[in-house]
Amino acid sequence: MHGFIATYLRELLIMRHRFWRIIMSFSVSPLLYLIAFGLGMGHHMKVGGVSYVEFLIPGLVAMTSMTQGFGINVEINVARFYLKVFEEFQAAPISNFSYVCGEVAAGVTRALLSASVIVIIAILAGLKLHFNLGFWSIAALNATFFAALGVTSAMLIKNHADQSLITNLIITPMAFLGGTFFPIKNLPEWARLPLELIPLSHASKAIRQIALGGAFSWSDATLLLSLAIFAMLLAWWSVDKARD
């Protein structure tokens, strides 16, 4: 527990030091998407009986909980390659699992903070969506899965170029194809079936269903929880491998 607190507290102190810069960076992408896609055609286009901007907001929450959760790998890379903080963790009496939990918790915190910015923007825009406990639970599960994957990638890569390659080949395509900007069910079957296997697709669907007043999706929540547990174990293994 002390190791978890130490790891998590370090990341929180970094976030506090950069708080307003982080908030500004979290705000830019959602505002651009809302202006370009939401306001540009959101009042004239309907998707599933709701305006496109109401369809878009939950998708943006799912997407940002993925990208910001996975983005913890950047902080780990800087600490590992340049500041040599990971070597200090190796020397400290901190278990590998405590270290993983601390970094994943920091990634989830980043993700939920970013999602909160989108929710605030939606509220200020007068959108009547439901941001209840189920909404935040799905976002947190999605963030946990991708934060754990971020820890794994940070442990396995050898340089920043490899990290950029992973982001460009996996995270960025998933952000656009995971049900964020368009309903996957409208695609042809040959394209729809593979995209329905993407974790982000399940997160987008579950978050959107709750935000639009639907029921909590236990099947999607169970799937995301299972994936999060698997990713945590994978991150734990990757830290063991990196220490060796």
Image (cartoon, helix red, strand yellow):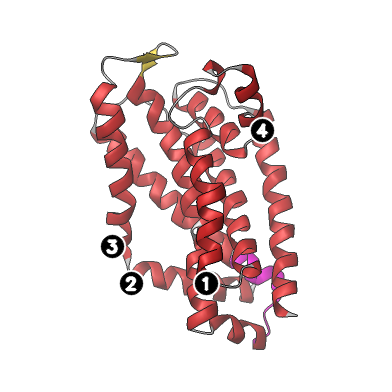
Q: In the rendered image of this protein, does residue 204 appear above or below residue 244?
A: above
**Which numbered marker is on residue 17?**
2
User: How far apart, in angstroms, are the residues tagged by discs 1 and 3?
Assistant: 20 Å
> Is the C terminus in the top left, top right, bottom left or bottom right quadrant?
bottom right
**Which numbered marker is on residue 197?**
4
| Left-right relation of 196 to 77 | right
Q: Amino acid at mark 1?
A: Asn
Q: In the rendered image of this protein, does residue 220 appear above or below residue 2?
A: above
CB-based contact (under 8 Å), mark 4 and mark 1: no
Q: In the rendered image of this protein, does residue 95 appear above or below residue 212?
A: below
> Is the N terminus in the top left, top right, bottom left or bottom right quadrant?
bottom right
**Could you say whether the residue bearing mark 4 is in a helix, strand or loop?**
loop
Which residue: 47% across, 56% down?
109
Crowding at dot 4, Cα within 10 Å, few <14 / some 14-19 / many 20+, comes out as few
Could you tell which of marks 3 and 4 lies nearer the N-terminus? Answer: 3
Query: Mark 2, mark 1: which one is toward the viewer?
Result: 1
User: How far apart, in angstroms, are the residues tagged by discs 4 and 1?
Assistant: 29 Å
In the picture of the structure, the residue carrying the numbered disc 1 is 77
Q: Amino acid at mark 4?
A: Leu
Residue 6 horizontal/vertical position (percent):
55, 76
Could you tell which of marks 2 and 4 lies nearer the N-terminus? Answer: 2
**Which numbered marker is on residue 113?**
none
Crowding at dot 1, Cα within 10 Å, few <14 / some 14-19 / many 20+, comes out as many
